[in-house]
Amino acid sequence: MKTISNILLLTDFSEVSENAELYAIQIGKKSNAKMVIMHIVNTPIDWRNITLDKENLYPEIKSKIAHAKSKLFELINRFSEHGIEARQELVFNMSSENIPSYISADYFDLIIMGSHGASGVKEFTLGSNAQKMIRATSIPTLVVKQKPTGDIHTIVFASDFDESQKHSFENIVALADKLKA
């Protein structure tokens, strides 16, 4: 049976991301999976190839990056306190946010992310980033809005039973087994 070895937690440090973190801790502890915590900073230029002199022209971006590094460090420590091996991934993105392009389908077994929902109908819809993830990746994705109220007992796997979903289904079965769901 497939095991859950590598989990990706996407965070924007919001309340729903904190809720997703709680699920990630619960799942990470029970599956003994490694955790990658990813945050994306949108930048107006290619930040990876910018000189130090030019960085000073963008103090607001430097401030966002410093804040993100600090928050990621805190998250890594929280996971460590729960005995979960975690590392951070800070991504600099120049274009409109395209999270799926940063994710390796060969590496991750599960993605966990929070979703704010579309404004006005938050209770019934997923946000645009969550919808992009679900449509663009073959990796099972847990979309979280609220804090967990206890252990996970039930998992729903929406499927059209296409053969291409077999790998995702095997991942979910393995997760359900670990969680005793």
Image (tube, rainbow, N blue to C red):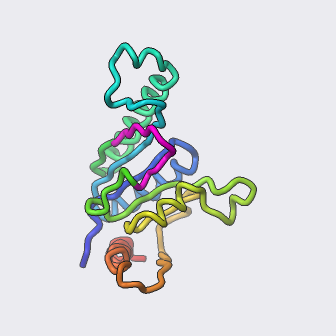
**Residue range of the region highlighted in magenta in the rendering:** 89-100
- Horizontal relation, residue 179 to residue 148: left or right: left
In this view of the protein, which residue sits in the foreground, 52 or 147? 52
Residue under the point 31% across and 64% down:
31
Residue under the point 47% across and 46% down:
11
Across and down, in percent, residue 101 comes to 38, 53
What is the quadrant of the N terminus in the image? bottom left
Decide whether residue 99 is among the magenta residues. yes
Across and down, in percent, residue 4 comes to 29, 66
- Horizontal relation, residue 12 to residue 8: left or right: right
Q: In this view, does 165 lie above or below 55?
A: below
In this view of the protein, which residue sits in the foreground, 96 or 3? 96
In this view of the protein, which residue sits in the foreground, 162 or 155? 162
Image quadrant in which you'd find residue 94: top left
Residue under the point 41% across and 84% down:
162
- Horizontal relation, residue 172 to residue 14: left or right: left
Q: How many marks?
A: 0
Across and down, in percent, residue 146 comes to 59, 58
Q: Is residue 165 above or below residue 150?
A: below
What is the quadrant of the C terminus in the image? bottom left
Image quadrant in which you'd find residue 66: top left
Across and down, in percent, residue 133 comes to 47, 60
Decide whether residue 66 is among the magenta residues. no
